Structures are given as structure tokens and as C-alpha cells.
Amino acid sequence: MHHASDILLTIFIIFIAAQVGAEIAQRLRLPAVVGEIAAGCMVGPSLLGWLTPGQILPGTPLDVLAEIGVVLLLFSVGLETRLEDLKKVGKSAVLVGVLGVLLPFAAGALWAHGEGFAWVKSLFVAAAFVATSAGITARVLQELGVLQRTESRVILGAAVIDDILAMLLLGVVSSLQGGGSLDMHSLLLTLGGAIGFVAIIGWGGAQVMRRRSNWLDAPASPHSALTLVLALCLGLAWLSTRFGLAAIIGAFLAGMIASETRQRDELEHKTLPLLSFLTPFFFVITGAKINLAELASTHALLALLVVTVIAILSKLLGGFLGALSLGRRSATIVGFGMVPRGEVGVVIASLGLTAGVFSEQIYAIIVAMSLLTAMITPPVLAWLLRERGDTTMAAPDPDI
């Protein structure tokens, strides 16, 4: 009972910290997510210590709660995204996804090799520069009410492609550690499985839901539509991990499938209370994972500055070039939308530390870079979108 009460107290602290941080951020005309990540830094092990390192390790109750929060967030984003909308920006999304992986990977490898790493280990470090955190950008786009804009659809489509390519790259560099040989057959099978999963679930599920959404109302419960699509969300989130993808990709696909139903508006309305409660845990715990003690030196801070600049510019350039057909302004929005690394960089850094690829300090630098890109991007993205004028208006689609 004592253990259960401790967990409840910790959940209370995280939730209140998230609300205070979000309120302060919004009063400063910043997205709420910035305040929630900053609140995590405050209550985490580096400052106030109200969250201990052991409480936020992968697999702990708080980490699971955070994972559920981000899964529901991407599900809700999928609810506002139609398959037809993504198909219209498919070419731009592919270009953004590919260039947004290749440029950061190359830049990260060059930096790591310049720091003295062998090329094989440099490639592992570079993998942490690659994958965009769809959860952070999606939250900002959702807050601003611009998920229907062309730029938003390109970002979300590119994030799916980004995750597939990041998974493939991580498989390549992991196999090279310790002198291992590269199994191209296995990698091609993994890549084909991931692409097939996204295509079949996304397209096939949407076709089924368009014709058979009435089955969601078949059970007697008045909440049957919500409970059934939440089951679909959790099931596809798990299934996507079996194909080597992030759970949030499956959750996004589940939301996109559910967006084809006639109960779409009802589902959006009923998921809001769940989002309000669970999503902040993900962002607070993301902020709590940084260890400021490892950055308490001039060399570490300078390295952090260089790494963050490389991470921002390489992703921004990749996204900008990939979306240039939309116009310079829209391409800049897409580029910044792809910048946050968030939890993805943290996970890859953790794998590198466990494998002995790099030291605690390099780990802290990579984690801090991931969190800084997550905090810097939202206010810039919000400013760019507000500068466009009416944020609820969709930009003209060049592919129509």
C-alpha cells in the first residue's frame, strides 16, 4: 500500500508540474509543450529531484504511463488526418522524409568522427540525429488547430517515412558494432515488412472503415465506438513494434483509419479528456531524462551547442529542400516541423550507452540535444504558422 501511495504522489507531482509549466508557457505565448518539458527538467533528478532516475527508466510505471500518453496523442492526430489528404502530398512527404534522414545522419557522423570516434561508432552516434519526434510536432500543430494544412500533412507523412528509415539505419549501424557483418537480406526483409505494414494497415483499414463503420455501434454500451477504436489503437501500436517501428506509428494509423468512420466527430470529442490527463506525462518525463551534471564543463557545453546547431540545421535543410515545391515559406515550416528529436534520440542514446559505444558525457550531450530541439522548435513553429495569418486555413495544395 505504501508503494502504491508513493506512485500516486509522484503522478500527482508530475501532473501539477505539467499544468503549471503549460500555464506559464501559454502566458508567455509559447506552446504548452515547452512548459511541460521544462517542468520535467525542474522536477527531475538534475534539479529538484522529485523524480529519481530509477522512476523514469524504460519499463517503469511512469515510463509506461508516458508511452500511453504519446500513443493516445498520435491516435488523436490520426483522427484529424484522412488518407486522401496524405496521398495528395505523398511526393513531398517522401522527399522530406528521405532528405531529413540522410543529411542529419551524414552531419552527425562527421561530428562524431571529428570528436575522435572510429567511423563504425560514429555511425551509431549519427543514428541519434536522425529520427523526428512526431509526438512533439503533432502536439504543436494540434494546439494551433492547423492539422488540416498542407504543411502539417507533409510533416505527418514524412514522420512515418522518417521512422521507417531511422529503424533501418539503426539496424545497419547496430550490426556493424563489434565487427559484425551486415546482413542485407535480413535488413531488406525488415524494411519490406515495415513498408508493407504501413501500406496494408493504412490503406486497407481505411477502405474497411468507410464501408463498415456501423459495427462500432453494434455493442449495447453507449461508449462502444470509443472503446473499440481505443482497442484498435493499442493493438496496432503493439503490432507496429513487431515490425520494428515505433508504437506511435501504429497509433497514428489507427486514428487515420477511425477518421474514415461516421463517428469521427464523436470520437474526437470523447478522446479530449483522455488526452488532457495522459499526454502531459510524456512531455514531463521526456524533460526529466536529462542529466545536467554531465554538462557542467565548458567542453561539454560547447559540444552541446555544436551538436544542437548541427541537429537543427541538418534537419531544417532536409525538410526545406524536400518541401520546396510548396514555396519557401511553407518549406521552412515543414523543415522546422521535422527538427524535434525528443524521445527518439533519447532511446537511441540509451542503446549506445548500454552497448558501450560512448561515455556518460556523450550520452548526456545527445539526450540534451534531443530535448533542446524539442523545446526550441515549438515556439519557432508557432510563430511561423501565426505569421502566415489564419492558422485554421489550409494552404493551397500544389499536387491537386
Image (cartoon, grey):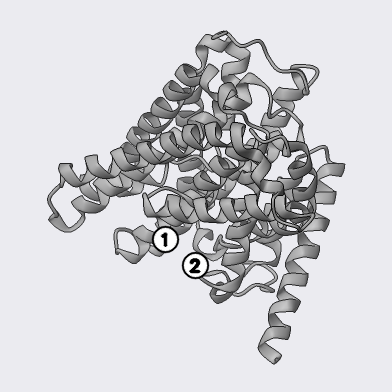
x, y percent for residue 384: 70, 23
Residue 350 — which label?
A: 1
Bin the neighbour count of mark 2 within 10 Å (Cα to Cα): few under 14, some 14-19, many 20 and up. Answer: few
Q: Secondary structure at mark 1?
A: helix
Residue pushed farthest right?
27
Residue 58 — which label?
A: 2
Observer-nearest of 52 and 146: 146
In the image, what residue occupies the spot 61% across and 41% down? 255
In which quadrant will I find the N terminus?
bottom right
Observer-nearest of 370 and 91: 91
Observer-nearest of 264 and 125: 264
Pointer 1 with pointer 2, Cβ within 8 A: yes
In the image, what residue occupies the spot 83% across and 57% down? 20
Vertical comparison of 49 with 108: above or below:
below
Mark with earlier residue (1, 2) = 2
Bin the neighbour count of mark 1 within 10 Å (Cα to Cα): few under 14, some 14-19, many 20 and up. Answer: some
Mark toward the viewer: 1 or 2: 2
Vertical comparison of 257 with 90: above or below:
below
Residue 243 — which label?
A: none
x, y percent for residue 212: 61, 38
x, y percent for residue 327: 58, 9
